Amino acid sequence: MTRIALATALLAMAVTCAAAQTTAPAPQTKGQTNIVVNPTEAECRTGWNASLKWSKEQFDQFCTTITKSK
């Protein structure tokens, strides 16, 4: 009797997990651009320019955080 109850509980848990996985939205990715690397200290010292991968606002925010953490 215990084995039947255990098997039933495991089956119910597996069905619940499978249902939860199929209803969750898929993460949105944009190729390799989903990883953001903050500017280095040297880049912050050099300053922002239009060829960088960050907007001016993002760059300033990252560099301010780096400066405050030291």
Image (cartoon, rainbow, N blue to C red):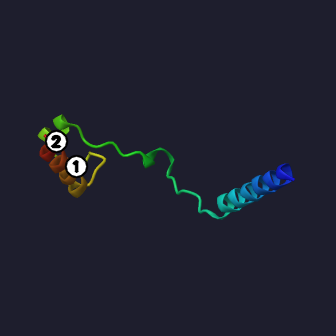
Identify the amino acid type marked 1: Phe
Answer left or right for 34 relative to 3: left
Residue 61 lies, with reference to residue 37, above or below; the image says: below
Given contact means CB atoms under 8 Å apart, are the residues at marks 1 and 2 in contact?
yes
**Given the current orientation, which residue lies at the most extreme bottom position?**
23
Q: Nearer the viewer, residue 19 or 28?
A: 19
* SS at mark 2 in the image: helix
Q: Residues within 10 Å of mark 2 (few under 14, many from 20)?
A: some
Answer left or right for 26 relative to 14: left
Q: Position of residue 26 (x, y in %)?
A: 59, 58
Residue shown at the point (21%, 55%) measured from the top left: 56
Q: Which residue is mark 2?
A: 44
Identify the amino acid type marked 2: Cys
Q: Position of residue 38 (x, y in %)?
A: 28, 43
Q: Where's the C terminus, which quadrant?
A: top left
Residue shown at the point (82%, 51%) measured from the top left: 2
Q: Nearer the viewer, residue 29 or 70?
A: 70
**Given the current orientation, which residue lies at the most extreme top position?**
42
Residue shown at the point (18%, 52%) measured from the top left: 60
Question: In the rendered structure, which disc, 1 or 2, sits on the residue that comes first in sequence?
Answer: 2
Q: Distance between the Cα atoms at labels 1 and 2?
A: 9 Å
Residue shown at the point (25%, 41%) measured from the top left: 39
Residue 62: which disc? 1
